[in-house]
Amino acid sequence: MHDEKNTPDDKKIREALAHVKNRLLVFSGKGGVGKSTVAANLAWALSDKGLKVGLLDVDIHGPNLAKMLGAENRQVGTAGDKIIPVSINDNLKLLSMAFFLERLDAPVVWRGPLKMKAIRQFIEDATWGDLDWLICDSPPGTGDEPLSVASLIPATAAVIVTTPQEVSLLDSRKAVTFAQLLNLKILGMIENMSGFICPHCGGKTDLFKSGGGETIAHEYKIPFLGRIPIDPHIVDSGDNGQPFIHYRKDSAAAAAFSAIVDKIIA
C-alpha cells in the first residue's frame, strides 16, 4: 500500500509540473561517460534556441553542474517557502545540491529516503516558472535518484549516454532495460568519447573503439542520436564553466552535439 504523500499524484507535484512542457532524464549505466557534460550542454543548447529550460542536478553525492556552468559560487534565492533556482542565462535556470553545501569538499552522506525527499523538494518547492524543458541530470546507474525522478515525474523521457567500450556497453544495456521497466520513453542513445580527432593532422583514432552505442540502439530498437568525439577543449570548457557547444562552436564535438540536440527537439 502506497503512502499518498509519496505518490506522483501529489497535488504539489502536479501543480509544479503543470508549467513544464517536456521532461527529460539524462542518465547512464556507469560513471565516467560524460553524462553531466551532455546534460549541461544540452540544457545550454536548448536555452540558446530561445527555449525556457530548467536543469535539475539530482546527483546528490556528486553535483557537478554548478561547476560546469560557471555558477559554483552562486546561491539559490528564497521567497517564503519556495526555492528560487540560479539563473545561468536569460533562458536557463539551475538547481543543484551544490548550492546547499557549506564547503565544496563537504560530502553528502545520505541514505535513500533522504535523497528521495531532497529530489521531491527540488521539484515541488522550486519556482521554475513556465518551462519548455526540465532536464534532470541523474547519477550513473539504476539506483535511488533515477528511480525517484521516474516515480515523481510522470511521462518522463530519457536519454542514455554511453561510451564505445564493452564495459560501458554492458551497463548501458542495463540502463535501457531499467528505462523500459519504468515505462520511460527513450528518446535515444548518445555515444560519447567516440574517437579522438587529432587537432594537427585531422586523423581519427578510436581510443575506446567505436559504434557500440549504435549497436545497442539497433539491438533494442531505440533511436541512435549520434557520436561525440573526444576533444581536449571539452575538458577545459567544463573546468572553466563554459559549455563547449557555445564557446567552441567551431569544433567537431560541438557540431556533432548540435545535430544531436536537433534530433532531441524533433
Image (spheres, rainbow, N blue to C red):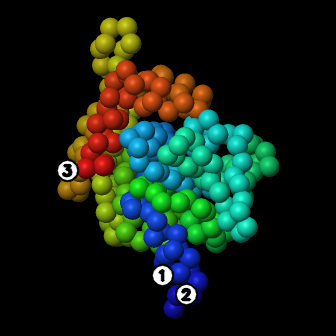
The reply to whether dot 2 and dot 1 touch (C-beta < 8 Å) is yes
The three-letter code of the residue at mark 2 reads Glu
User: Would you name the residue on which mark 2 appears?
Assistant: 4
What residue sits right under mark 3 in the picture? 218
Q: Looking at the image, which residue sits at the far top? A: 200
Disc number lying in front (2 or 3): 2
The residue closer to the viewer here, 141 or 57, is 57
Q: Is residue 70 left or right of residue 161?
A: right
Q: Which tag is nearer the camera, tag 2 or tag 1?
A: 1
Mark 3 surroundings within 10 Å by alpha-carbon count, few (fewer than 14), some (14 through 19), many (20 or more): few
The local secondary structure at tag 3 comes to helix
Amino acid at pointer 3: His
Secondary structure at numbered mark 2: helix
Q: Amino acid at mark 1?
A: Asp
Is the residue 121 above or below the residue 215 in the image?
below
Of callouts 3 and 1, the N-terminal one: 1
Q: Earlier along the polypeptide chain: callout 2 or callout 1?
A: 2
Residue under numbered circle 1: 9
Residues at discs 2 and 3 in contact (Cβ within 8 Å):
no
Mark 2 / mark 3, whichever is N-terminal: 2
Distance from the alpha carbon under mark 2 to that under mark 3:
39 Å
Give the class, few, some or many, for how many residues have Cα within 10 Å of label 1's Cα (few <14, many ≥20). Answer: some
Q: Is residue 2 above or below residue 169?
A: below
Q: Residue at x 56, y 49 (%)?
A: 93
Q: Nearer the viewer, residue 4 or 34?
A: 4
| Residue 170: image location, x then y, percent | 36, 50
x, y percent for residue 26: 43, 52
Residue 30 in the image: x percent, y percent? 46, 49
Q: Residue at x 56, y 76 (%)?
A: 12
Q: Is residue 215 left or right of residue 170?
A: left
